Amino acid sequence: MEKRLSFKIAPNFESVDMVRKALMEFCRDAYRGAEAESTTGDLCLAATEAMNNAVEHSGAEKVEIEISAGEAKVVFCIITEGKKFDPTDGVSMPVLGEGKELQEGGFGLAIIKEMVDSVRYEYVNGRNVMMLDKVIIGKKGEGDYGI
């Protein structure tokens, strides 16, 4: 049975922190075991970075979040209105040269792609829809998430 959770949040960092905590709890309830904890942590890092990017760069008045947990995979979907921005287009880790200082910024999208199994993107009716897919290794939880 698939579990779902959704939010409509203000684009601010307090809301990001609230969703991050809810995502961790949601995943802990849906999946059990040490391996699930590790892969859940990767998803939460990627999701937090995606939400931070939406807060900092989208200019959206609200951010919609949809989370679904299937038998062995979580899909974290973030939706913003505004100008088209495809985060899957040509993203790579910034080059670090020897003797150069570490640059500020430019790592977020690369980190997201590194932490999840796939990043999908659609632009539908003036809305950017970014989906992060993460296979969660562990036993499926028996609990019921009451939201």
Image (spheres, rainbow, N blue to C red):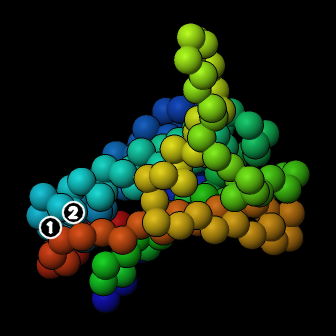
Q: Nearer the viewer, mark 2 or mark 1?
A: 2
**Residue 124 left/right relative to 118:** right
**Image location (x, y in percent) of residue 36:** 21, 63
> Where is residue 17, by image quadrant?
top left
Residue 48, above or below 2:
above
**Image location (x, y in percent) of residue 83:** 87, 51
Residue 138, above or below 43:
below
Q: Amino acid at mark 1?
A: Arg
- Residue lying furthest left: 33
Split into 4 quadrants, where in the image is the C terminus?
bottom left
Split into 4 quadrants, where in the image is the N terminus?
bottom left
Q: Amino acid at mark 2?
A: Ala
What kind of element bears circle 1?
A: strand
> Looking at this view, is 143 or 96 the one in front?
96
> Looking at this view, is 93 or 125 the one in front?
93
Identified at 80% across, 67% down, the residue is 123
- Residue lying furthest front: 98
Identified at 79% across, 62% down, the residue is 127
**Image location (x, y in percent) of residue 12:** 59, 34
Q: Mark 2 and mark 1 in contact? Answer it, CB < 8 Å.
A: yes
Which labelled disc corresponds to residue 96? Answer: none
To which residue does mark 2 refer?
Answer: 36
**Image location (x, y in percent) of residue 43:** 40, 55
To which residue does mark 1 refer?
Answer: 32
Residue 120, above or below 49:
below
